[in-house]
Amino acid sequence: MILRQFLHSDPVAVSYLFGCGGKASGAVVDPVGDVAPYLEAAEALGLRILYVIDTHLHADHVSSGRALAAASGGDYVLHADAAATFAFKRVRDGEQLELGNVVAKVLHTPGHTPEHIALVATDRTRATEPWFVLTGHTLMVGDLGRTELASSAEDGARNRAINTGLLVPA
């Protein structure tokens, strides 16, 4: 399992490159800004970028996901319900993105935005249990992502409460 974090200060954001070194298969999650650092890191690690995943349509900054997908030849990935007019690979809750010995399971986690997803990563050569989850600006150390970016605060909070099991849908 390979996992690299990219911290951004303007805008404040976090991106990730992860995947399977043994099978040279990787994914980039929530890329921001210049695509060169992601391409250079993947090349240095011997990874082919198969997927460029945006966990949600970003209202707080501009994604470089489509540009990175074009530059790397990887599929650009969003939740199937994303209100986008451009082409992308549509994923739904429970689907898995294969990265060699690593698998990323898609969890539909509405709340921050209606189409938001999280990714649960498992390295199948080491264990059947997941190793980590990438929550895409919704769960942070000591904080939570805003719930009113693409809906009302009430709808976003209700969706988050249902998703986390704090509220049972009627």
Image (cartoon, rainbow, N blue to C red):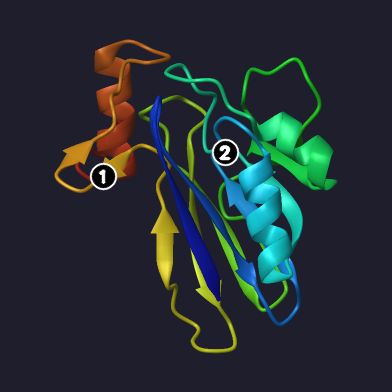
For this orientation, the residue located farthest to the left is 142
Q: Within the image, what quadrant is residue 66 found in? A: top right
16 horizontally vs 69: left or right: left
- The crowd level at tag 1 (other Cα within 10 Å; few <14, some 14-19, many 20+) is few
Q: Secondary structure at mark 1?
A: strand
Identify the residue under disc 2: 31
Decide which of 107, 133 is in the foreground and name it: 133
Could you tell me the amino acid type at mark 2? Pro
- The crowd level at tag 2 (other Cα within 10 Å; few <14, some 14-19, many 20+) is many
Q: Is residue 154 visible?
A: yes
The structure residue drawn at horizontal position 31% and vertical position 18%, both measured from the top left corner, is: 155
Provide residue 5's location: percent of width, then percent of height: 45, 55
Provide residue 127's location: percent of width, then percent of height: 49, 87
98 horizontally vs 134: left or right: right
Provide residue 99's location: percent of width, then percent of height: 70, 67
Q: Secondary structure at mark 2?
A: loop
Decide which of 65, 161 is in the foreground and name it: 65
Whichever of labels 2 and 1 marks the residue nearer the N terminus, that label is: 2
Q: Quadrant of the N terminus?
A: bottom right
Identify the residue under disc 1: 140
| Depicted 118 relative to depicted 113: above or below | below
